[in-house]
Image (cartoon, grey):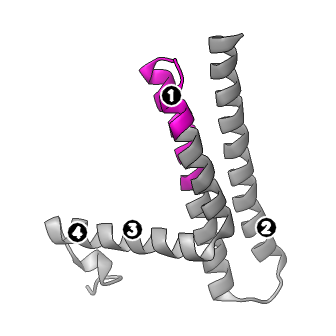
């Protein structure tokens, strides 16, 4: 049986190293081609600095940074869905719109989760 892709044919350390460089390529492509990703990275960097400076527990710092990282993760998944939809066809289609809208809704929910998390931690600490 033939491997599905060149990536799938590797095993062991070679697969891990190759996967790492594919991931770096993914970050580069997202940074170059996705404005929302660049904005969210900016929020992540600023938020991480603020979280590390706050007088909260190590666990709360982890949670504050973790929800910001989750936004980036969901944005990357959303961008991959959009790329696949566009690869299949640039023609307008209700299913293509749904796929893109679902991804966007996932990013929105993640942003709302991050906002609520930050609000609760800051409220409990300072109010």
Q: Quadrant of residue 10?
A: bottom left
Q: Earlier in the sequence, mark 1 or mark 4?
A: 4
Give the distance between the C-alpha atoms of the residues marked 4 and 2, in whole angstroms: 35 Å
Q: Please tell me whether mark 3 or mark 1 is closer to you in this view.
A: 1
User: Which disc is residue 53 wearing?
Assistant: 1
Q: Which residues are magenta?
A: 49-73
User: Which disc is residue 23 wearing?
Assistant: 3
Quadrant into which the C terminus falls: top right
Q: Residue furthest top?
A: 127
Give the x, y percent position of residue 91.
79, 89
Q: Earlier in the sequence, mark 4 or mark 2?
A: 4
Q: Please tell me whether mark 2 or mark 3 is closer to you in this view.
A: 3
Q: Which residue is mark 4?
A: 17
Q: Earlier in the sequence, mark 2 or mark 3?
A: 3
Answer yes or no: do the residues labelled 2 and 1 have beta carbons within 8 Å? no
Q: Earlier in the sequence, mark 3 or mark 1?
A: 3
Give the x, y percent position of residue 39.
66, 58
Q: Which residue is mark 2?
A: 98
Q: Does the magenta portion include 127? A: no
Q: Does the magenta portion include 52? A: yes
Quadrant into which the N terminus falls: bottom left
Answer yes or no: do the residues labelled 2 and 3 have beta carbons within 8 Å? no
Q: Residue at x 52, y 39 (%)?
A: 48
């Amino acid at each position: 049986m033939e491997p599905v892709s060149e990536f799938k044919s590797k095993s062991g350390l070679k697969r891990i190293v190759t996967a790492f460089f594919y991931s770096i390529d993914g970050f580069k492509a997202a940074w170059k081609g996705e404005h929302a990703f660049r904005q969210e990275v900016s929020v992540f960097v600023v938020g991480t600095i603020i979280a590390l400076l706050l007088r909260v527990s190590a666990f709360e710092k982890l949670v504050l940074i973790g929800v910001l990282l989750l936004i980036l993760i969901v944005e990357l998944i959303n961008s991959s869905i959009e790329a696949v939809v566009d690869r299949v066809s640039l023609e307008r289609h209700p299913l293509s719109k749904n796929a893109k809208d679902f991804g966007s809704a996932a990013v929105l929910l993640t942003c709302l989760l991050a906002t609520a998390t930050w609000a609760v931690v800051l409220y409990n600490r300072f109010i």
